[in-house]
Structure formats: C-alpha cells, structure tokens
Amino acid sequence: MIKGLAITPPVIGRISIGKVVEKNGKRLPEKDDQFTITSQVQNRDGWVNHPLDEALRKSGSDKLRSIPIRLLFNEPDLNLRAEYNLFDPQSGRPLCVGNGETCKRFTTTGMQTLPCPSPDGCDLAKGGACKPYGRLNVMIGDTEEMGTFIFRTTGFNSIRTLAARLSYYQAASGDLLACLPLELRLRGKSTTLSHRSAIYYVDITVREGLTIEEAFAQARQLNERRQSSGYEQAALDVVAREGLSNGAFEDSEEERPEVIEEFFTETDASAGGISKKPCTEEKVGLREKLNAKVGNVEA
C-alpha cells in the first residue's frame, strides 16, 4: 500500500442538496430543497445526473427528498468521517485537519500533530476559514456491490444528526448497522439565525413503511445470509480503518477543486477563507498567520 495515500471507500457517484450556479461571471454554491444524485462526470452545464436520480424521481414525487440506502460498514465513523478543516486559500489544499482535541497541520517543517481547540477557540479559524466537514458514503438501494455514493457537507445540523443516528442504530441493532434497510431523508427547520426561513439538513431513518422492529428483523436475516456465504463484515471494517488512516488527509488532489467550489463562496474569501482568484495580500496574511501560530506552539 502506498504510504501517505488514504484508501477511501470506492465512489461511483455523488449526493448533494445544492448546486453550483453562475452569477455575474462567478460560479457560486447554491442550496436546494431536494437531493440530486450525480455521476462523477461533468459537462459544460455541471455534473451529469446518475440514472438512479431519474429512477427514484419516477417512483415518488418530482422533488427527491428520500433515498433508500444501505451502509458499507458497521462502525459509524467509517461511514461518516467528520472533522474541522482549514484550507489553503490558493490551492484548496487542507492545511490543518482536527477533531477538537488534536490536529494534523502542515508547517514549514512538515506535518505535525498539535492541539486542536476547535474553531471557537482557535485564532486561525477566525473569519470562517476553518469549517466542519463531513463525508458520508452510502450504497443506494439493496445492491451487494461495494460501490458507494458520497454526500459531503459542512453543515453542523447534518453532521450532528447523522453521527447520532448512526451510533444509535449500531447500538440498538446489536452491531448490525451495515445490514439495516435505511433511508437518507431531507428535513427542514427554521431558526432565528436563518431569519425564520427554512434550512435543510440530512437525516437517516429506517425505510418508509417499516417499523424499527421490522428493520432490525430484516437486518438479522441479512446478517445470517451473509455469514453463511462467508461475508466477513468485521474484517472489512478493519481493512477500511487501516486504509483511511494510511493518509493524513482524505481528499485527493483532483477532488479539492470540487470541494472548494461546492462549499466556499466569495464571502468566505473576503473573510480570509477560500477563493478561486489569484493570491492577494489578504491570503498571504493567512499563511503567515498560520506559520506564526505554529512557531508559537513549537516554542
């Protein structure tokens, strides 16, 4: 295995609740009130929809707000990886990735492991430069193949809700998370911060039409069939964890522009965050600030 390269779940498509639109010559992220399932291919108009997108819309309403899924792993944090990310303003390369306790950070002397106070307590995170960033891998439908669709989010509501659901379902089912018939569901809520307008986040529930008891019974049956056929779920989880830990950062070089375009606006850039424009004095200042902070920690 190549050292330094994170081995991630195979991805055959994307799930999003937003899109990138062009306004005044700029490509900016825009939130939506439904899911869109795309392939990994882009054309001049953006991402090409996956055939499953049309198929699921035909079986329900025009707006796709629920997707039948299964998970690849029993361990919740293998299906959903979430951490704080501070991105380089020029290249989109992650400079610092932390979990609120420790972080891995690029410094002038190489990669280092340092304390992570979370964005609320970190000088480098001021202005929104550091964001929570979650990646959820799911299989759509009941296929036994290991190809997954990835849902990326920087929303606290989605990350917190998904993490809770996965942990609860794993515990309540007796460690049969990968066998449960589940559903990715879009929910809306209003807060004072959203000025009473609806904001959308992603949740996971048992599939529509099933009680939780029926879902657990189906999971036990599927687990028994897998065991009789020689399917080693525990070994799969071990190999997946080793693969993810093989690299410091998960996203590859070719994925970084996609992440930046999808999640960071010109407002983020003016606050010291990400921009697709050439480097300015403001962006150089962020890098110098990072190096100075590292120097203080090392001292």
Image (cartoon, rainbow, N blue to C red):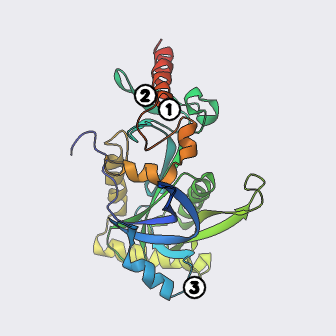
Residue 176 in sight in this render: no
Is residue 263 visible to the viewer in this orientation of the structure? yes
Q: Which residue position is annotated with label 2? A: 113
The x and y percentages for residue 195 are: 76, 56
Secondary structure at badge 3 equals loop
What residue is rendered at 57% in x and 85% in y?
Answer: 61
Q: Label 1: which residue? A: 102
The label shown at residue 61 is 3
State the image quarter where residue 127 is shown: top right
Left or right of 76? Residue 196 is: right
Q: Amino acid at mark 2?
A: Thr
Disc 2 to disc 3, C-alpha distance: 48 Å
Disc 1: CA contacts within 10 A as few (<14), some (14-19) or many (>=20): some
For the residue carrying disc 2, how many other residues have a C-alpha within 10 Å: few (<14), some (14-19), or many (20+)?
A: few
Judging depth in this view, the residue of 100 and 130 nearest the camera is: 130
Label pair 2/1, CB-CB below 8 angstroms: yes
Between discs 1 and 3, the one toward the N terminus: 3
Q: Position of residue 92 (x, y in %)?
A: 40, 42
Of badges 2 and 3, the one in the foreground is 3
- In the rendered structure, which disc, 2 or 3, sits on the residue that comes first in sequence? 3
